[in-house]
Amino acid sequence: MSIALDRHVYPFTAIVGQESMKLALILNAVVPTIGGVLIRGEKGTGKSTAVRALARLLPEHNVVEGCHFGCDPDDREALCADCRSRLKAAGVLPSHQRRMRVIELPINASEDRVVGTIDIEAALRAGARRFEPGVLAEANRNILYVDEVNLLDDHLVDVLLDAAAMGVNVVEREGVSFSHPARFILIGTMNPEEGELRPQLLDRFGLCVDVEGIRDPDERVLIAERDAAFKRGDHEFVNEFAAADHNLSRALGEAIAAVKNVRISAGQARLISSICVEADVLGHRADVVIDHAARALAAYRRHISPTREDIYDAATLALAHRARQPINRDHEETSSPQSGEGQEGSKPTDTQAGEPQPSDSDAPAETTAEESSSASDGGQQSAGSDQGMTTGGSSGHESAPEATETFNLRRIDLPRQRRVRKQGGKRSASQTPDRRGRYVRAAPKAKVNDLAIDATVRAAAPMQKDRGRLPGERLKLERPDLRQKVRERKIGNLIVFVVDASASMDAEQRMAATKGAILSLLQDAYVRRDRVAVVIFKNRTAEVVLRPTSSVSLARRRLEKLSVGGTTPLTHGLMAGYKVVKTELLRDPTIRPLLVLISDGRGNISMFKEEPLVEAQKVAGMIDAEEIDALVIDSARDYSHLPSVQHLARVAPMYQTYAINACADLAERMGARYYGLYDLSRDEIASAVERELGRAR
Amino acid sequence: MAIDRYSYPFTAIVGQEEMKLALVLNAINPSIGGVLIRGEKGTGKSTAVRALAHLLPDQQVVDGCHFGCHPEDPEDWCADCRDRAQSGDLPVTTRRMRVVELPINASEDRVVGTIDLEAALKEGSRRFEPGVLAEANRNILYVDEVNLLDDHIVDVLLDAAAMGVNTVEREGVSVSHPSRFILVGTMNPEEGELRPQLLDRFGLCVDVEGIRDLDQRVAIVEKRSDWEDDPHKFVRDHADDEQDVRSHIAEAIATLPEVDLPREILRLIAQISIALEVDGHRSDLVCARAAQAKAAFDSAEQVKTTHVGWVAEMVFAHRVHSVPFGKGGPNLAEVIARMIGQG
């Protein structure tokens, strides 16, 4: 399936900078059990280019002739069933050398093609249920590459996780029961802007690198020049880098041969474990990965035993997505006796042979400092995401000093924060009853209206012989053969803000914080498919100032000039918000709306000629009855429990409303969660909404 | 040539010079990576894209190939052409580059291709029926209202655009075929934003607005009514202009590889990227290619600062991070003007 589009494959060694990324890829080629690499980074930094370029450097290995799974003739344990029976019959397996390959998994692949399925032709001809291998079969002993891995459908992620965990692909579908080896090096690239990876899948990647754009003008010029030369097919360029690629490929081959002899001393093993403890990682996968990566690195750098540098470099790559605490090399050197030991053991090799790649040895000290700082960065990122629902606490802690600064725009743009918040809103694909969305698999159904032809044919194929179909005749289909397409589509949330714009002490601040929160929620709208609507109430009426939209620019324009002042027509506001929700639900019943009320809860304008507070309570009851998810954010300080207020209410009935927490009461009637946030800030509102969406699901 | 609503001549479009230039530059150098046209309804976005088709160069294709493979580019051949080439020479035909439209309600199977229904039901065989991405190979892929495209279709587009290959592993078929296209999209930003990942895939981006100049507005209406009165005559009247631009483009395509791209220019471009704090390096590459194409179109032998000036806004407009309420952040026009002036 891999087309040799060689003219379009950029040479690996011509990639400027991005040393960590290149190193991580190379290490995996040396020791496949490292477990792959995840490359995260902004768009246009050469992530995919590097992976595709790697294919040309990969070593050759021995494969059994004619085996679908490319079994290793020398690894009797891991042979597929076919090879095993061949070995039994013939006593020996014919084999040949083949270059390791990069197999691409397109993110819209259907499950049957990934795991393999029934061989239709065999089924038609002989009525036999034979297995036809899929992508996982091809990937065995090769590299499985998923571009934009964070966009992979959940059901495919499950399949990958299963196979990666066991090294075996077990297929039980369409009457086929089969299992075959599926050990692959998983390489994924992703742009975190588009959404996060499931933690389980994240942990599967042995190494992780974060790439960034290069800021040095000279290097950027070099990138552009090389790109132009490559596009032109410039001979000098092609020759130079073909030779460089060839050299690197040879160094790789030598490293593979040498890695068996790399020894790790007890002291070094201790150092690795102590780094993992310092980084506060979960589980023990990190230790194993660092061990493998350090061996690979030592072999690649021609050390007999890993140096302290090798171990820390390996750790940096292995911990980028696992560390929950930053690691510090220098500090470790002085304080830990074990690490000194480790270094002792490897010292003699330090002075041996230079680096195969000069670019690595040029400035080890410099790159180290840079790398460890990026590691600590990553550490905090995953610290947030690992904690899941409790992230509110950690982000609260982060933003605490700025709680008074209600409109800090820079803050929310930090990717780290975005990542943290994303954990709260777990809104992913939902199965859709209509014909929209991606066809993910097929299932039998009583009434089929969206026929899955491939699955139907597969179901019918083995029966053809029994049904008396002659060759050349059309397929004999029967009702039980029919399969329906199961489709999934990402469904976003509709967040309807109902905001009190009446003149109270905090009105200006409340408005500014709300605007900020809405815009920050919309910043990510493309990831979450969210839409936001805004209802404002003041004076005698409520107004829908922003119809449901995902457009940041539109929201910005509509929200820019909103004024505050006047009385509090709370009922009007709630009714208007309720109507927006109902209308949108009519339009698309699959959406999940969330109504967010931001107010002090003290309505003073009547809509239905009743006591304003009682009216509001009734509308709250309606919202609860319709099972609309809601959230109430109290913008007033709660004095209701103070003895003086309680006393005042008893003696003067007009102050009675101050003796109950009106907002909390409304929230209860709505079946909503209540947040008392007197010091409103955009971050607090946004994270409250995020938490709510996570819960609401 | 039959006259239909797609025949409105490119050269008869009044104003909107940026948009026209962006389209022409892509025709000269497809590796610029397409153009996104943002703007209100009724500003001639779609008309311009369709009109561009008449100015596109002729190209050689393998006769009968679903993907329009290039007969002299064996590395890029589809599996079918490879097989056919084994048993003798490939038949060659010439055709004009085309504008292939991707309707926003297109289903995924129509876009990437699917299992051939008839063959499946008749013989139970799994033949691949090519989709829009096959047709778009070596052509222009035009998506009107690209911001309304379903997510999973966008994913597919991104994949194909990134690799130049459409890999299909679904519905029982396993195929991959070349799919290199110039992506042209139009959108009205009020309807929602585009995903940044897709945004970045567009080499250039132009914002069009309704023309405020009275004379030009009158000219638009006049041309339109001339066109409606007698489209044949209208096309005839513009035939010379069209031919001019067409041969100009053809010349630029021929001379493009020889246009010198000095290091100072690349440096200037890198500095603009750094000053504007854009993500990644795609902007540098696109800017260099676009400036080179502009130089070729102007029959210049070397890329000059002015050429960068012509294209810089189109390259960076959609890559600068937007900041809510316009606070902070580098100002696009200002930075470009400063850098260009300095260089």
Image (spheres, rainbow, N blue to C red):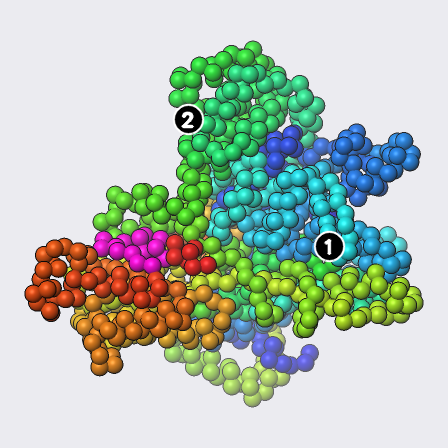
Q: Which mark is residue A501?
A: none
Tell me if residue A564 is in the magenta stretch.
no
Q: Measured along the vertical axis of the image, is residue A562 above or below residue A247?
A: below
Q: Does B97 sit left or right of A199 as displayed?
A: right
- The residue drawn where x is 44% and y is 31% is A280
- The residue drawn where x is 54% and y is 23% is A310
- Which picture quadrant has residue B98? bottom right
x and y percentages locating residue B153 in the rendered image: 59, 62
x and y percentages locating residue B282 in the rendered image: 52, 49
**Type of amino acid at the residue the image marks with label 2:** Asn
Which residues fall within the magenta stretch? A673-689
Q: Which residue is mark 2?
A: A328
For this rendering, which residue is in front, B316 or A324? A324
Q: Chain of mark 2?
A: A
Q: Which residue is mark 1?
A: A173
For this rendering, which residue is in front, A56 or A97? A97
x and y percentages locating residue B252 in the rendered image: 60, 58
